[in-house]
């Protein structure tokens, strides 16, 4: 049998994907149900979730959930709903993130925007991963978690609330990988480059800085995401960060923001 046949077991594998209504989260969630994995599509927008599920290859394997993960009460509700629908959740993808506005640079970003970015990316990611891991550990079952970080976890983006949240997530991946590894729960990061999805609209001229010559699309991330999530394909991989950026990280293209005198 080919190594790449049946990377997941539909009889035992289940998944929760946040930010599944659009962009990278949507592409990964759709790819998971396409492999037969029962998957919770979690997003802040009911319209987006329903559209993502309807456009999936196997919508009958999808479970919708709508809520704002900026609050821990919503995280608790998502955990409860996921366990009620799927039992133990063996695969977790944290892709949810508030929109980014170029105007929110260091001298302009307000407290609410700062707090919301950290709450959804970092706080919710930790709370959900820990909740899922506790149940897997109690059940003595393996798991695989994947966090969507960013190139800007290590490179300034002119958006300090975003970059610091993603930097925190990058270290969270390492902390959780070290703690959960003895329980056969793997934790890794996927590091996107300039992906034209999820509300991010890049200037087409940015492509000249990308060695592969084009902006990325959400669907470019899904194959790598599933490969890393699969215990069959990546069973000895944890605490790692996989860059999918067409080579963009080989350059430094951002200039400091223009500030009014």
Image (cartoon, helix red, strand yellow):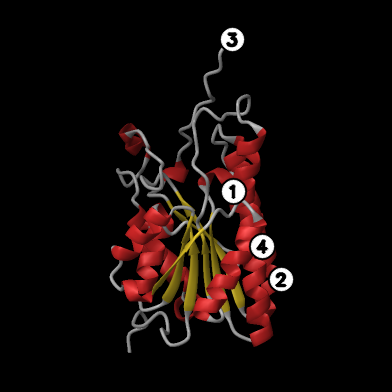
Q: Disc 2 on helix, strand or loop?
A: helix
Between 258 and 40, the one nearer to me in the picture:
40
Closer to the chain start, of discs 2 and 1, is 1
Residue carrying label 1: 166
Give the spatial CA distance, label 1 vs label 3: 30 Å
- Compare residues 244 and 62 and report the one nearer the observer: 62
- Which residue is under mark 3? 261
Q: Which is more N-terminal, label 3 or label 1?
A: 1
> Residue 46, how many percent across, how many down?
42, 56
The quarter of the rendered structure image containing the N terminus is bottom left
Where in the figure is residue 246, as x and y percent of width and height?
Answer: 37, 49
Residue 137 pos. (x, y %): 67, 81
Identify the secondary structure beneath mark 4: helix
**Secondary structure state at the residue bearing disc 3:** loop
Task: Tell us which disc is closer to us: 3 or 4.
Answer: 4
Where is mark 4, residue-wise? 127
Residue 89 visible in the displayed image = no
Q: Name the residue that disc number 2 marks.
A: 179
- From the viewer's perspective, tell me whether residue 208 is left or right of residue 229: left
**Which residue: 62% across, 57% down?**
124
| Label whose residue precedes the other's in the sequence (2 or 3) | 2
């Amino acid at each position: 049998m080919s190594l790449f046949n049946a990377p997941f077991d539909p009889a035992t594998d289940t998944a929760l994907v946040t930010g599944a209504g659009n962009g990278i989260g949507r592409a990964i969630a759709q790819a998971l149900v396409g492999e037969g994995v029962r998957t919770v599509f979690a997003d802040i927008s009911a319209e987006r979730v329903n559209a993502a599920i309807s456009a999936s290859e196997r919508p009958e394997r999808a479970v919708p959930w709508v809520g704002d993960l900026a609050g821990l009460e919503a995280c608790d509700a998502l955990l409860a709903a996921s366990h009620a629908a799927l039992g133990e959740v063996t695969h977790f993808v944290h892709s949810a993130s508030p929109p980014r506005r170029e105007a929110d640079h260091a001298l302009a970003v307000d407290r609410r925007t700062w707090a919301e970015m950290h709450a959804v990316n970092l706080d919710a990611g930790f709370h959900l991963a820990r909740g899922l891991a506790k149940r897997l550990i109690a059940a003595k079952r393996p798991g695989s978690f994947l966090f969507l970080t960013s190139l800007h976890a290590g490179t300034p983006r002119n958006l300090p609330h975003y970059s610091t949240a993603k930097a925190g997530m990058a270290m969270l991946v390492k902390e959780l990988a070290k703690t959960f590894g003895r329980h056969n729960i793997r934790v890794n990061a996927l590091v996107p480059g300039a992906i034209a999805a999820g509300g991010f609209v890049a200037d087409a001229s940015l492509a000249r800085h990308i060695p592969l010559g084009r902006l990325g699309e959400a669907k470019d991330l899904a194959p790598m995401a599933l490969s890393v999530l699969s215990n069959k394909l990546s069973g000895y991989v944890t605490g790692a960060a996989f860059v999918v950026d067409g080579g963009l990280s080989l350059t430094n293209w951002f200039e400091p923001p223009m500030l009014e005198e």
